[in-house]
Image: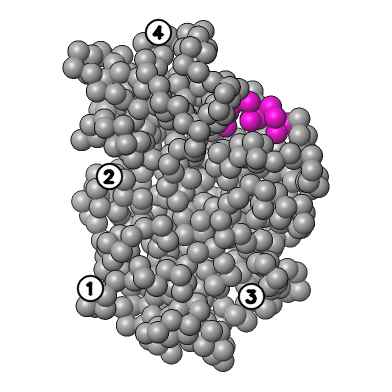
């Protein structure tokens, strides 16, 4: 099934031998195999695979009429919806490169991505048109289309009406298919270059490790403009010929109603979303017997959440998937039968992934010891868009240096202990904040937790915990007593901030610790 291959002019890694030749070929194969099966559901709109392909070819022809060809960048300022998926595959049909933009970003960030990528076309939802920079600031942008009628923008609906008469581009799988800009929580955002090979490999990994097929139905509720929504939500389901139900944004009750209505079989969300389903609804009120795969990532799943989901949905298998934009989504997977007993592990490497733990001198450490996780494989991007300095800093011999502190145990299971920048150094004791957060979220009444470093003139840093809690169920005395039985004394938080609202998150669902530190007045330099 797999073999070593040479790619990107410098790397050798293991790939699936039998695979679609590029991103568009994943759709073409499903159109051939399942022409009349439902591909997309969004509100009252339904498209079969044949209908989706007609839309894709029409938009491709319309973009080609405006000069878009192989290698050209097509930016997308689109929320979750059918146009996002159509444009994604229309660009792939032409051999062009999509640049999904973060709809929660502001105009400077949007402008940076447009200018840096030199995008020549932009498709934007009408509600986000105010975020589009002035034409003078984006000289390479020669065509702008809006979904919905907006003055100064051409009509996306006109693209859909274009006769689908353009030939299919013969796109090499090593070519860049998508540029995804990193969140930019530190420094200027970098454009990770996802290739056709990486996308096909990751979509195939999801399909195989989760046993996805044409009868599977997912609800994409995480942002499509981030790697999880794009690869796990869209490409993986197109790859297996399944059905994608689209929701604009996550609201627990609406999500559960939709899951029951359409017989959702698989999902991939952050743990907080599962937690909100338990806190804001009674799962017994919904027909969810078809839900068999619950993928998650971005943070450990609290033990209490695992237990409650197991009782409410005994047929649901929780699977932890660890990855990043630079790994085209999944680098590891935890099989469902191991999740409860290995809750703090993110599983074993995905097929084709090579993961090692390296010390600061670039030497691999022994099993059970911690260091930085380095990742290599077909899923790892070749580099960043026109950023050789970042390439030299963050890649070595085909490995991407993740910035995550982790370890691999004697049985080969990967553990992500912390981000390098999130470690707390309390008088020389290095404290993994993820470990403390896991202990805190195991306590009934704690919805989510973020542990940050509080500056201290004597010890350098002390441990501070910010918690989202159920009002009336938690106080500091109970928290301190709980931590004292689970953690070393230097690991225990010495101060707390309790909130009855959820913690701030980025568009990919990860807690923004930098914002929390700023709100608390802690030094983030």
Q: Which quadrant of the figure contains the C terminus?
A: top left
User: Is 52 on the left-hand or right-hand side of 186?
Assistant: right
**What mark, if any, has residue 389 been given in the picture?**
none
Q: Residue at x 60, y 66 (%)?
A: 26
In space, the residues marked 3 and 2 are separated at their CA atoms by 39 Å
Segment tinted magenta in the rendering: 301-310
In space, the residues marked 1 and 2 are separated at their CA atoms by 24 Å
- Could you tell which of marks 4 and 3 lies nearer the N-terminus? 3
> Under tag 3, what secondary structure?
helix
- Could you tell which of marks 2 and 4 lies nearer the N-terminus? 2
User: Is 137 on the left-hand or right-hand side of 378?
Assistant: left
Q: Residue at x 79, y 43 (%)?
A: 285
Would you name the residue on which mark 4 appears? 489
Task: Please rate how many residues cluster around mark 1, counting C-alpha atoms within 10 Å: few if below 14, some from 14 to 19, many from 20.
Answer: few
Q: Residue at x 54, y 72 (%)?
A: 83
Would you name the residue on which mark 2 appears? 186
- Name the spot of residue 317 as percent of width and height, x first: 70, 38
Question: How many discs mark residues in the rendered view?
Answer: 4
Q: Is residue 97 visible?
A: no
Residue 27, magenta (yes or no): no
Would you name the residue on which mark 1 appears? 137
Residues marked 3 and 2 touching at CB (< 8 Å): no
> Under tag 1, what secondary structure?
helix
- Could you tell which of marks 3 and 1 lies nearer the N-terminus? 3
- Could you tell which of marks 1 and 4 lies nearer the N-terminus? 1
């Amino acid at each position: 099934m797999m073999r070593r291959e040479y790619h990107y002019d410098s790397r050798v890694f293991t790939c699936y031998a039998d695979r679609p030749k590029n991103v568009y070929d994943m759709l073409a194969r499903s159109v051939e195999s399942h022409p009349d099966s439902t591909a997309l559901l969004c509100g009252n709109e339904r498209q079969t695979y044949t209908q989706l392909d007609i839309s894709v070819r029409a938009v491709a022809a319309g973009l080609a009429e405006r000069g878009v060809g192989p290698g050209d960048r097509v930016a997308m300022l689109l929320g979750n919806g059918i146009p996002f998926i159509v444009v994604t595959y229309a660009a792939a049909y032409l051999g062009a490169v999509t640049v999904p933009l973060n709809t929660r970003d502001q105009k400077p960030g949007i402008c940076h991505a447009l200018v840096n990528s030199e995008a020549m076309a932009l498709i934007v939802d009408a509600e986000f048109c105010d975020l589009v920079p002035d034409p003078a600031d984006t000289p390479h942008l020669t065509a702008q289309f809006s979904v919905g009628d907006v003055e100064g923008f051409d009509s996306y609906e006109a693209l859909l009406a274009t006769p689908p008469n353009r030939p299919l581009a013969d796109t090499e799988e090593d070519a860049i298919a998508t540029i995804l800009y990193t969140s930019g929580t530190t420094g200027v955002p970098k454009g990770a270059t996802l290739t056709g090979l990486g996308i096909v490999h990751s979509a195939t990994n999801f399909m195989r490790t989760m046993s996805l097929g044409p009868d599977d139905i997912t609800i994409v509720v995480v942002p499509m403009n981030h790697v999880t929504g794009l690869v796990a939500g869209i490409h993986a389901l197109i790859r297996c010929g399944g059905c994608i139900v689209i929701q604009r944004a996550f609201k627990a009750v609406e999500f559960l109603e939709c899951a029951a209505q359409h017989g959702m079989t698989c999902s991939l969300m952050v743990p907080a979303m599962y937690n909100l389903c338990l806190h804001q609804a009674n799962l017994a009120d919904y027909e969810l017997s078809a839900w068999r795969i619950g993928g998650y990532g971005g943070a450990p799943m609290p033990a209490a959440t695992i237990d409650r989901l197991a009782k409410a949905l005994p047929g649901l298998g929780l699977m932890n998937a660890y990855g990043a934009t630079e790994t085209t989504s999944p680098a590891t997977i935890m099989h469902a039968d191991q999740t409860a007993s290995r809750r703090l592990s993110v599983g074993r490497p995905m097929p084709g992934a090579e993961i090692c733990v390296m010390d600061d001198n670039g030497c691999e450490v022994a099993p059970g010891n911690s260091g930085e996780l380095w990742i290599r494989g077909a899923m790892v991007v070749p580099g960043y868009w026109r950023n050789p300095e970042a390439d030299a800093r963050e890649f070595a011999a085909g490995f991407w240096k993740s910035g995550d502190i982790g370890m691999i145990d004697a049985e080969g299971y990967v553990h992500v202990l912390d981000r390098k920048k999130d470690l707390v150094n309390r008088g020389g004791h290095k404290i993994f904040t993820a470990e403390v957060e896991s202990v805190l979220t195991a306590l009934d009444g704690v919805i989510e937790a973020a542990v940050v470093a509080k500056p201290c003139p004597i010890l350098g840093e002390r441990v501070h915990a910010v918690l989202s809690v159920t009002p009336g169920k938690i106080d500091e005395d109970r928290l301190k007593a709980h931590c004292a039985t689970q953690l070393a004394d230097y690991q225990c938080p010495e101060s707390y901030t309790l909130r009855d609202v959820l913690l701030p998150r980025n568009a990919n669902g990860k807690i923004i610790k930098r914002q929390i530190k700023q709100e608390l007045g802690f030094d983030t330099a």
